[in-house]
Image (cartoon, helix red, strand yellow):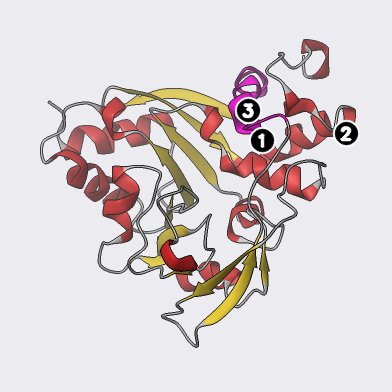
Amino acid sequence: MYTKEDLLKQMAEIGIDPKGVLLIHSSMKAVGPVEGRADTVIDAFMEYMKDGLLIFPTHSWSSENLKDNIYDPRTEPSCVGILTNIFRQREGVVRSLHPSHSVAVIGKGAMEYIKLEEGKELYTPCPRDGCWSHLYDMEAQILFLGCSLTRNTFIHSIEEWFDVPDRINPNARRIKIINPYGEDYYTDLHGHHSSYGDVSQNYGKLLKPFLHKGFARKGRIGDAESYLCDAVGMADLTSQFLERDLNLFKDNEPVPEEWYL
C-alpha cells in the first residue's frame, strides 16, 4: 500500500515541476491501494504543487449534468472521476465558469486563470481564449495519471485553433450560469459533435510521436502507468500534423512515421 510520501517521491521521479503549472487527467482505480485512498492522492498533489498552479478538469458535459439548464460551479458534479470531485470541493480551490468543460484550480494565479472563462455570451468547448488553450501560454505540464491520451482535452483546443470542420455542434443550448464571483448570466453552449463519432478516441495515436520527440515521458505514480506531457511541445507537433491533414483524427490510423522521425 502506498503512502503520501511514496507518491511525492514518484511525482519527482516522473519530472513534475513543483513550481510550474500542472493539469491532471486521472484514474483513481489505476493508482491502486493508497493509505487514506483518494483523499491522500489529492493531499499529495496539493502538497507537491504548493508553490505552483494545480488544475483538475471538472467537466459537466454528461447527460446527468446541467439539470434544468443551470450551471453552478459550487455544486455541479464533475463527470470525469472521483479525484476531480474531491479536489473541486477542497478549501481554497476555485472553479471556472465554463458550463461543460470547467477546470478547478488552486495556487499561484488561480483566480486570474479561471476568469478567462467568465461572462462569455457563447461557449465552445475549448476556445483559444479559454482555460484549456491557455495551458499553452503558461507552458503547462499535463499528467495522464493512469489514463491514456484519449482523455487529452487539450487536443480539442488545437482542433478549435485550426477550425477543423465537423467538430462543434451548430445547435446551442441556453444555460444559466450561477456566478459566485459576480452577477449571474445566460450563455449559449455549443458542445462537441462530429459525424465521425467521438474523435478523442483517436487521440491516442499521438503518444508514439510525443514519446519519440520527448514531449511525453513515461513513469508510475502508485500502480498507475502515467505519462507527463509538455503542452507546448504537444501543441506545436500536433499543429504540424494538422497542417498536413486537417482531418487527422477522423480515424485511428497511426501518424505516418516520416512526419516526425
Q: In which quarter of the image is the C terminus?
A: top right
In the rendered image, which quarter is residue 166 located in? top right
**Could you say where residue 201 lies in the image, as x and y percent from the top left?**
59, 27
Task: Tell me which amino acid carries mark 1.
Answer: Met
Check the image and report above or below for 122 versus 180. Answer: above
Q: Which residue is depicted at the point 46% across and 69% down?
A: 70
Determine which quarter of the picture holds residue 41.
Answer: top left
Residue 201 is covered by the magenta coloring? yes
Residue to which mark 1 is pinned: 234
Mark 3 or mark 2, whichever is nearer to me: 3
As shown in the figure, which amino acid type bears the numbered disc 2? Glu
When asked about the image quadrant of residue 54, the answer is: bottom left
Which is more toward the observer, 211 or 73? 73
The residue pinned by badge 2 equals 243
Q: Is residue 42 magenta?
A: no
The tag on residue 203 is 3
- For label 1, the SS is helix
Kind of residue at badge 3:
Tyr
Query: Dot 1 surroundings within 10 Å: few (below 14), some, or many (20 or more)?
Result: many
Q: Which of marks 3 and 1 is in front?
A: 3
Task: Say which residue appears at 69% left-offset and 57% top-offset.
Answer: 127
Left or right of 215? Residue 78 is left
* Magenta-tinted stretch: 196-214
